[in-house]
Image (spheres, rainbow, N blue to C red):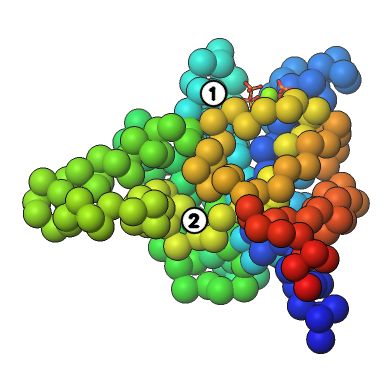
Amino acid sequence: MRQGRARTVRHPRHVAIIMDGNGRWARARGLPRSMGHRRGVEAVRAAVRAAGELGIEYLTLFAFSSENWRRPKDEIEELLGLLKHFIRRDLADLHKEGVRVRVIGGRDDLSADIRSLLEEAENLTRDNSRQTLVIAFNYGARDEVARAVKRIAEKFAAGEVTLDALTADYLGEHMDTAGIPDPDLIIRTSGELRLSNFLLWQAAYSEFVFMPCLWPDFDRQSFEDAIAEYASRDRRFGGLSREIAS
Ligand code: IPE
Ligand code: IPE
Ligand code: MG
């Protein structure tokens, strides 16, 4: 019985991935960065499939950050084009597989065609329950916190909430990730050791696995390795380790 419980606790319910290294993957092969991004989409498809097979309920993928607008215009165009292509090509399959799509990140500064594609993906798959794919697009954690505070300020101004009700949980309910459990495991590929403005609020007690492999090379085995590493961690949440407590 105790063993069964331990196994459940050691299996991540929500895995979030900072998919990094497409450009270096391409450069190592003498290819343009765009080719790295294209191969990166293949790795996305494989990761979504693997997450389903591995029983991961929530998979969040960092696809484009609020800071990625600093890149050259043609690279931004490529990344926006790949998102559109991915949704147009894969949405029906994701829906058939019972995947619910959620998108986090700022919507206001996206073009109307991307906004409507993202809405279409969310609306079509709203009632699916097998697996949730959270796409972080035009996402920055500081922007997200600002958006949440703005939503709450509007409610406050309208007299819909009192100061006493403004708890951490209440703030969490106003983040883009409302209703999504915090990530148990955050993976970053490409060897960089930073969060780059990803899920700062939600990562309070996440476990981190940094992998040297570049995102286009991230495969099922890499995913399983990261989960095995996660399973070996002792998550204490400020309390005592399971071994000491039991
Ligand atoms: C990740 O790969 C994709 C995005 C950030 C959109 P990069 O494009 O950051 O690749 P590197 O880090 O330059 O190798
Ligand atoms: C983080 O990667 C963003 C995504 C993976 C979408 P970056 O390549 O943008 O991060 P930095 O600039 O190296 O911190
Ligand atoms: Mg990068």
Q: Is residue 149 left or right of residue 128?
A: left
Say above or below: 50 vs 171. Answer: below
Tag 2–tag 1 contact (CB < 8 Å): no
Pinpoint residue 52: horizontal percent, then vertical percent. Answer: 72, 65
Q: Is residue 80 left or right of residue 232?
A: left
Characterize the local packing of mark 2: few (<14), some (14-19) or many (20 or more) Cα atoms within 10 angstroms. Answer: many
Instruction: Tell me the kind of residue under disc 1.
Output: Asn
Q: Nearer the viewer, residue 130 or 150?
A: 150
Say above or below: 80 vs 49. Answer: above
Instruction: Tell me the kind of residue under disc 2.
Output: Arg
Pinpoint residue 228: horizontal percent, then vertical percent. Answer: 87, 56
Q: Nearer the viewer, residue 197 or 1?
A: 1
- What residue lies at 53% left-to-right and 38% top-to-bottom? 200
Mark toward the start of the polypeptide (2 vs 1): 1
Pinpoint residue 236: horizontal percent, then vertical percent. Answer: 70, 56
Which residue is the site of mark 2? 102
**Residue 222, visible in the rendered structure:** yes
Residue 68 - label: 1
Q: Is residue 7 left or right of residue 185?
A: right
Give SS at disc 2: strand
Q: Is residue 72 left or right of residue 37?
A: left
- What residue lies at 35% left-to-right and 31% top-to-bottom? 109
Instruction: Give the quadrant of the N terminus.
Output: bottom right
**Residue 83, visible in the rendered structure:** no
